[in-house]
Amino acid sequence: MSTRAAPGGGPVVEVRELVKDYVTRDARLRQHIARAVDGVSFQIHAGETFAIVGESGSGKTTVGRVLLKLTSLTDGAVLFRGDEIHEIPERRFRPDRRHMQMVFQDPLAAFDPQTSIRSSLREFTRLRDTQSRAEENEAIAEAVRSVGLEPEIADRRPSQVSGGQLQRLSIARSLLPEPELLFLDEPTSSLDVSIRGQIVNLLLDLQDRNDLAYLLVAHDLRVVYAMAQRVAVMYLGQFVEVGSRDQVYANAVHPYTRGLLDAAELDEPPRHGDPVRLVGEISEEAAKKPGCRLTQRCPFAVERCEEPQPLRETEAGHLVRCWRAIEQPVEIGLPANE
């Protein structure tokens, strides 16, 4: 498989101040703008997994869809191997799509139920340099073997295989164009708990063998802990905390991150700081606020939290969008800054 690196050994993909607005109209045809992603920036290098976590409606999947140019952006930039892909006309960009693939949340919905799995896989072989039907079949067999299945399973229909097998085949399909980046959109959420670990181990093994870059979007914080080197916590379109996996899991400082981790009841790693219980639910109205968007749910909110909250560094590589976590850690149940 191709493992071509980005020019100069830089990131495979870089996102700069990404903004995505959706425009809707009400019954009176009045226009409303909902900002799904608000000023998000990150990089992913070859062989690395960058994960985005947060509740439904936080904007996680939208980031991935913009990253793959499946959805247009409103502002900002997405650079793939140094090129700004949203400035490239779709017809000229189409040959490069093979290098950016997606593994979907629901494998059954990702395949055509009326055709064989082989037919769905064959479409993806045509994104690479196969010249004949025999070469296509050999590429399919190789991809299916790489995910731990026998090639003959490709002749079945999606309804004739288990959910775990179908997700393996979905991964095989994404590998056929020889990509450099995979967007993993909740890749284990529709699977039984007993199968999730197998899929996680498979993805890690494929990444190690092929030096793949992963953008992982997930609710399951255990899956993220097993796979990611760096983690961003997203709330109503903004990153509220970003850091290495251990920084975010063991030393979370934003109240939202702490609340998510407490709700997940993780066995490891041990965490610093008092437990945090978030109240209420995510609200689109809060996304229009100039200050912290968590104030209505946060037990530590004070008047100053209504002011704009930039991402600030609490330690090298660890960013947080909460002034109290930086200036008043003890008052919100965190250890004192050293």
Image (cartoon, rainbow, N blue to C red):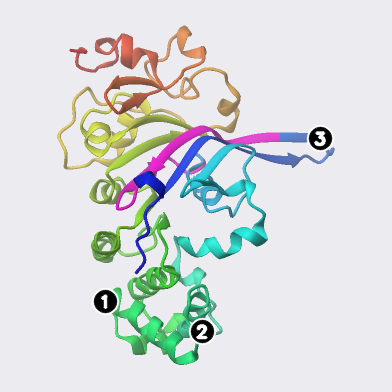
Query: Is the Cβ of the residue at disc 1 closer than 8 Å to that at disc 2?
Result: no
Rendered location of residue 83, percent (x, y):
53, 47
Query: Is the Cβ of the residue at disc 2 closer than 8 Å to that at disc 3?
Result: no
In the image, 305 versus 239, the foreground residue is 239
Rendered location of residue 211, percent (x, y):
30, 58
Residue at image coords 33%, 39%? 231
Q: Nearer the viewer, mark 1 or mark 3?
A: 1
- In the rendered image, which residue does mark 3 sit on? 30
> At label 3, which amino acid type do we have?
Arg
Q: Quadrant of the N terminus?
A: bottom left
> At label 1, which amino acid type do we have?
Gly
The image quadrant that residue 182 belongs to is bottom left
Residue at image coords 71%, 40%? 23
Q: Earlier in the sequence, mark 1 or mark 3?
A: 3
- SS class, disc 3: loop
- SS class, disc 1: loop
Q: Quadrant of the C terminus?
A: top left
Q: Residues within 10 Å of mark 1 (few under 14, many from 20)?
A: few
Figure check: 280 above or below 47: above
Q: Residue 39 colored magenta?
A: yes
Cα distance between the residues tagged 1 and 3: 53 Å
- In the rendered image, which residue does mark 1 sit on? 148
> At label 2, which amino acid type do we have?
Ser
Rendered location of residue 258, percent (x, y):
30, 29
- In the rendered image, which residue does mark 2 sit on? 119
In the image, 147 versus 177, the foreground residue is 177
Residue at image coords 23%, 28%? 251
Cα distance between the residues tagged 2 and 3: 45 Å
In this view of the protein, can residue 282 be seen by the observer? no
